[in-house]
């Protein structure tokens, strides 16, 4: 999903950015080892990319979710928001780094039922949080708790929603091109 209007701001690099943008790009490089296309564009607002990097790192480190659960949350949010870039990137991360089972990844990407019951409950609640704008019903929370999750996990989903809203919306506005390393995991909204 892409915005009708495409932002007309150039991709930035560590070598060419002004000092404020360079500092954030160096922080990004230290976190992931390269500058993804998304970061090179988001850094046009240093505060945007810096907020994303801090929130993303906090979610990865302190959310209490396993790697497969983290990717489930990020993928469901990105799918619901129609972010083709983040779906491609997180699909590769899910497969190569986070250990999300292939059948669960395929189900999340297509919106089909997830074979893992706990991940299915996590995905359903995450989808509810996106679509109900953070206003889950008592029944939705009860089902989430019944799957073994806590109120703290709900707040961590709010953090993930915040982080993915920053990246998903920026990618919509920039029409961000998928990096070559994610190309094998390309996803198209509505396909």
Image (cartoon, grey):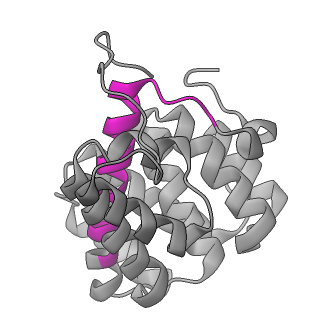
Q: Was residue 30 drawn as part of the magenta stretch in this picture?
A: no
Quarter of the image holding residue 58? bottom left
- Measuring from the top left, give residue 84's x and y in whole percent: 55, 33
* Percent of width and height locating residue 157: 34, 69
What residue lies at 52% left-to-right and 74% top-to-bottom?
30
Q: Judge by depth and name the residue closer to the eye, 75 or 127.
A: 75
Quadrant in the picture for the N terminus? top left
The number of numbered discs placed on residues in the rendered structure image is: 0
Front-lying residue, 55 or 17: 17
Position of 53 with respect to 99 (left or right) is: left
**In the rendered image, which quarter contains the C terminus?**
top right
Question: Is 109 or 43 nearer to us in this picture?
Answer: 43
Question: Does the rendering let one see residue 191?
Answer: yes
* Residue 64 visible in this rendered orientation of the protein: no
Main SS class of the magenta portion in the image: helix
- Identify the residue at image location x=26%, y=67%: 158
Q: Please report the residue visible at 40 percent of the width from the left and 72 percent of the height from the top.
A: 143
Of residue 47 and residue 15, the one placed in the foreground of this image is 15
Residue 163 belongs to the span the image colors magenta: yes
Snapshot quadrant of residue 81: top left
Residue 178, how many percent across, how many down?
62, 34
Relative to residue 67, is residue 45 depicted above or below?
above
State the extent of the magenta-drawn residues as a range: 156-178
């Amino acid at each position: 999903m892409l915005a009708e209007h495409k932002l007309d701001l150039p991709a930035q690099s560590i070598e060419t950015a002004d000092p404020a943008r360079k500092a954030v790009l160096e922080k990004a490089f230290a976190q992931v080892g390269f500058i993804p296309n998304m970061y090179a564009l988001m850094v046009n607002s240093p505060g945007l990319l810096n907020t994303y990097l801090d929130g993303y790192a906090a979610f990865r480190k302190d959310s209490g979710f396993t790697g497969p659960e983290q990717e489930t949350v990020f993928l469901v949010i990105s799918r619901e928001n129609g972010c083709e870039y983040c779906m491609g990137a997180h699909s590769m991360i899910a497969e190569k780094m986070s250990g999300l089972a292939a059948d669960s990844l395929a189900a999340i990407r297509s919106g089909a039922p997830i074979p893992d019951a706990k991940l299915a409950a996590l995905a359903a609640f995450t989808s509810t949080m996106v679509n109900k704008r953070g206003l889950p019903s008592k029944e939705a929370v009860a089902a989430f708790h019944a799957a073994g999750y806590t109120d703290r996990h709900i707040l961590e989903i709010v953090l993930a929603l915040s982080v993915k809203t920053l990246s998903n919306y920026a990618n919509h506005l920039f029409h961000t091109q998928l990096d070559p390393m994610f190309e094998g995991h390309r996803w198209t909204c509505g396909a």
